[in-house]
């Protein structure tokens, strides 16, 4: 049974810092891994999707990596801004999409 | 990109009543839609997979008689919470898969969610 873990559960950093969010999964037989952003009381915004054959994806200040063999992914956020404050969810797709519990990120102005 | 809508965005109802939530794929056809539930500070949990023209597949522990799913067209799936109780209060999110081949890798697109509060 696939399990997805995100560490840390919460993170506060000063504005401007670079930061890394971690995601690990137990079953490496996945089709893809996706990072989402969720603002309080809102739906999901897809940030980056990495196919199982890919190692990383980049979009603006965001870079996501995937090491399928070790069951790990990281989301790197460069030059953080207060608007980046949100919960970041990692989801892996096997026969179903399984979500982690998320990392609540707070960027301090 | 593909858009998925949900209606209503927020609903408050009395205990014992039934509530219907709609999920629509606005610019693509979705033979498969998914319903998720999210409790506060928890992960999204898959409740059921909705297939157009056939019965939904429910995850273990989800009562199919309580959470009725109808996927009558390629652009609409509905979730009806029957005889709602306060413990059903949650955030319900649907997603739809574009199987047309237009989108790479049959990606799933998520709706904005529906906040259900049962008094």
Image: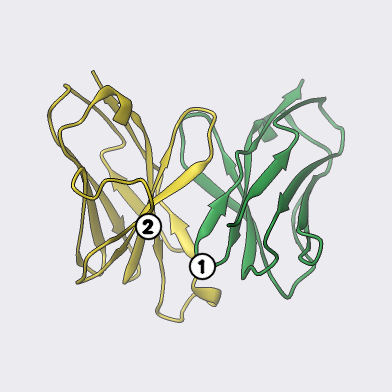
Chain colours: A green, B yellow
**Mark 1 surroundings: few (<14), some (14-19) or many (≥20) residues within 10 A:** few
Question: In this rendering, would A52 be left or right of B85?
Answer: right
Where residue B84 appears, as percent x and y from the top left, is 20, 31
Q: Give the labeled residue for mark 2.
A: B34
x and y, in percent, of residue A11 in the image: 75, 28
**Structural distance between the alpha carbons of marks 1 and 2:** 13 Å
Q: Quadrant of the C terminus of chain B?
A: top left
Percent position (x, y) of residue B57?
A: 31, 61
Instruction: Place residue A50 in its image quadrant.
Output: bottom right
The answer to whether residue A78 is left or right of residue B59 is right
Q: Residues within 10 Å of mark 2 (few under 14, many from 20)?
A: many
- Residue at 76% from the left image edge and 55% from the top image edge: A73
Q: Identify the residue at horizontal 76%, vertical 21% (top origin).
A: A108
Front position in the image: B41 or A35: B41
Secondary structure, mark 1, is loop
Q: Which residue is mark 1?
A: A95
Q: Are marks 1 and 2 in contact (CB under 8 Å)?
A: no
Residue A58 seen in render: yes
> Disc 2: which chain?
B
* In this view, the mark in front (1 or 2): 1
Above or below: residue B86 compared with residue A89: above
- Same-subunit check for callouts 1 and 2: no
Which label was assigned to residue A105? none
Tell me which chain the residue with mark 1 is part of. A
Q: Residue at x 28, y 23 (%)?
A: B86
């Amino acid at each position: 049974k696939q399990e997805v873990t995100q560490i840390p559960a919460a993170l506060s950093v000063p504005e401007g810092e670079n930061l890394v969010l971690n995601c690990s999964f137990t079953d490496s037989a996945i089709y893809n891994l996706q990072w989402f952003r969720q603002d309080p009381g809102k739906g999901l915004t897809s940030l980056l999707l990495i196919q199982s054959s890919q190692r990383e994806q980049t979009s603006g200040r965001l870079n996501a990596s995937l090491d399928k063999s070790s069951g790990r992914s990281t989301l790197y956020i460069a030059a953080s801004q207060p608007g980046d404050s949100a919960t970041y969810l990692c989801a892996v797709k096997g026969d179903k999409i399984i979500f982690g519990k998320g990392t609540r990120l707070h960027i301090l102005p | 990109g593909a858009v998925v809508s949900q209606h209503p965005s927020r609903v408050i109802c009395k205990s014992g009543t039934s509530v219907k939530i709609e999920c629509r794929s606005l610019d693509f056809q979705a033979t498969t839609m998914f319903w998720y539930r999210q409790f506060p500070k928890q992960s999204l949990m898959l409740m059921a997979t909705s297939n157009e023209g056939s019965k939904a597949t429910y995850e273990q522990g989800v009562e199919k008689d309580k959470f009725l799913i109808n996927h009558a067209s390629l652009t609409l799936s509905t979730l009806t919470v029957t005889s709602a109780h306060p413990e059903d209060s949650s955030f319900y999110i649907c997603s739809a898969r574009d199987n047309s081949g237009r989108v790479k890798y049959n990606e799933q697109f998520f709706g904005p969610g529906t906040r259900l509060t049962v008094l």
